Amino acid sequence: MVSIQRKLFFLFFVIIFFFGCGSDVDPGNIEGLPRSSEAIYQQDLKFFQTKESLLGDDSGDKSQILFGDLHVHTTYSIDAFTLELPMMGLQGVHDSSMACDFARYCANLDFFSFNDHAEGLTPDHWREQKKIIQQCNISNSDPAANDLVVFPGWEWTQIGITKENHWGHRNVIFKDIQNLPARPIGARTPGSGLGVFDTTEQAVSARWLDILNFKRYSDLQWLLNEVRNIPYCEEGIASPDLPLDCYEYAKTPRDLFSKLDEWNVDSIVIPHGQSWGYHVPLGTSWDNRLNFQGHDSSKQILLEIMSGHGNSEEFRDIASANFLQDNTMSCPEPTDDFLPCCWQAGEMQKKRCEGLTKDECDARVELAKQYTLAGGPYTNMVFPEAEPEEWLNCDQCNDCFKPSFNYRPKQSAQYALAISNFQDSEDSPQRYNFGFIASTDDHTARPGTGYKQYQRRKMTFATGVKSKIWEYQYKAEDPNFPEIPKIKPGESQPDSERVSSFVYPGGILAVHAEGRGKDAIWAALKNKNVYGTSGPKILLWFDLINSPEGKVPMGSEISMSQNPRFIVRAAGSFKQKPGCSNESVDSLSPERLDYLCAGECYNPSNEREVIEQIEVIKITPQKYAGEAISPLIQDPWKQIPCPGTGECVIEFEDENFSRDSVYYVRAIQKASPAINGAPLYQRDSFELCKGSFRTDLNDDCLSMTKERAWSSPIYIDKP
């Protein structure tokens, strides 16, 4: 018996010796060759035929619509690494090279960018990713049929614990890999540890339960240690003069803008995830960022309004908390349209009052409400042992399209466009003039996942442990007494089960570019001649046709006195055939194709989805300080039906143009099945679509919704 134990003990240490030492993740090798010029010509031919049908052959418009994704993470991001551990039952490593192959042969994109979190992106990884970008940007020999453009970049990931010190997330992208900043610039500051990524340390201990995958968890430990050991760059030294291998940080957006200026390179900064209450403190508002510290109109020209985290477009006059004059919070009562989580916490406490006096129960109910308000994004930690279903649909926007989780309405795109800052000038206030885009925020090196609604746990953030053995549960000191959550990032367990009902394959952006090359795509981004969709490749044109400069496209800023007239042209996305095209099958090995595309690729038929209607949104920004916001947002201002085909052309005029106004349109497709299309969906009873084993891992949680495209706004000032 002793001999057997010794052998097992020896075998255990052999496994640890050979498989247990953590090491770096290789950046991988691109497998697929550039797409042929012939294949791209055939693809473009379909587009130009539709364009001619909608615009005519003498429109003078020389542009074509190209599709991309400006928000892509790989395993170089710590959270992406953690989400793909074996305990999650998914696949494992998704390196930088895989993003290139997926973009070409799964999603059929024209461009994308890398945006790994700067807070955990090591100097070596930053350099390795630039090499992959060089390889991926190699195209066929025909410039007119350029295959794929990849932009370098990172994500600046800042999370505050109050509405005053929260700035939010921003992607930084660059046109060229030449003369790039020597290192990514993050938001993690000295003394903060790894910030929100500190919670990933819990996952490392799972290696002792999963010995055969011991090395995979040890690789995560290696990465965490590597990031912690990068010395912080010295403050007060110009960014180009800093050592190559230190970690550089910017505490505020202004610090980030200033450091980018020191490099004197062409860049775009894109805020995203603004309405996502998974990390945004209660009461956070665009108002606090429309100033010198929070905004630079020369850099923050685009806003990501849709991603795999949901839609951040729509404003609703709802509130999860009432802010009082002494800066304390009170809990609002529920309405027919909105259930505050603080109120629901009180209802949950009432069910835990058995055997208590009325006074004691009432006191605990009030504590539950106050703790929920104090807990901000971590409301679930007030009752850590509660089932997620007990929180019902609290803090959710119930009538929004694919809404972000725990919706923060004052962080929505519509609210941003409605506010003005009169601090420097009452006659010429500061405003946001964003172009609208959508992207995926994918964390598995899969740019452009929204082409089909399939494989929920691979194509969305709906990740969770594969069985009960891997569950990490917080134990309440007293299950019948509320607890106050710790709100420092990394100290509380996020509400991952409820949030999985509010994740989606993600959006995609389109540019009107005068060519397929990098310069043409970048020019369209800088001109804001862009739009976003919820995933499908919908075609959309939105033009002001009577400006002093003649016809001008979406994204334009114009001053005019006469009533503006507009024209909208839209075409539905191509209906998809099952499986993958012959080109995809021939270009990637069967193993690579299955690993990345999971059996389905962008595979268009010749038939388009029906465009059901065009919705026009009109916003009249504040013209004096304190002007109420809700009346300024008319959504929809006009709702115009289409003829029920794959193409739609409509014109309209604003006959009541009396003040500065902002206009944009939504092209709405006929309803189709979508992952989490109705985030809290009904079967036999109220049910969540969880990312863990507690929902069937093969269940895609499909429900009907109307996919759409959002144009960039046209901004018109009335003199």
Image (cartoon, grey):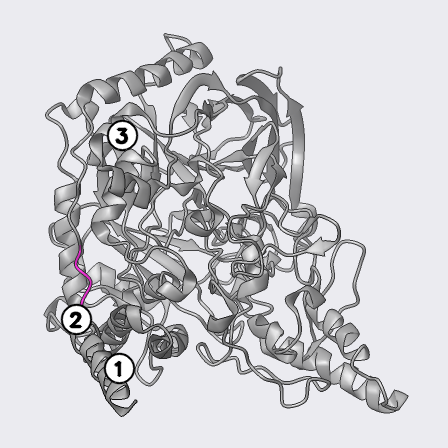
Q: CA distance from mark 3 to mark 1?
A: 45 Å
Which quarter of the rendering shows the N terminus? Answer: bottom left
Residue pushed farthest right? 358
First-in-chain label (2 vs 1): 1
Q: Which mark is residue 238?
A: 2
Q: Is residue 398 shown left or right of residue 715?
A: right
Badge 2 vs badge 3, beta-carbon distance below 8 Å: no
Pointer 3 local density, CA inside 10 Å: few below 14, some 14–19, many at least 20: some
Alpha carbon distance from label 2 to label 3: 49 Å
Q: Say above or below: 569 vs 409.
A: above
| Residue 638 image position (x, y, % from top left) | 66, 30
Q: Is residue 146 visible?
A: yes
Amino acid type of the residue that numbered disc 3 sits on in the rendered structure: Val
Residue tagged by mark 3? 585
| Secondary structure at numbered mark 3 | helix
Task: Point out the frontmost of discs 3 and 1.
Answer: 1
Residue receiving disc 1: 8
Q: For mark 2, give the secondary structure.
A: loop
Residue 592 in the figure: left or right of residue 676: left
Badge 1 amino acid: Leu
Is 456 contained in the magenta span? Answer: no
Q: Look at 45% across and 34% down and name the residue there.
A: 558
User: Residue at position x 41%, y 45% from top?
Assistant: 439
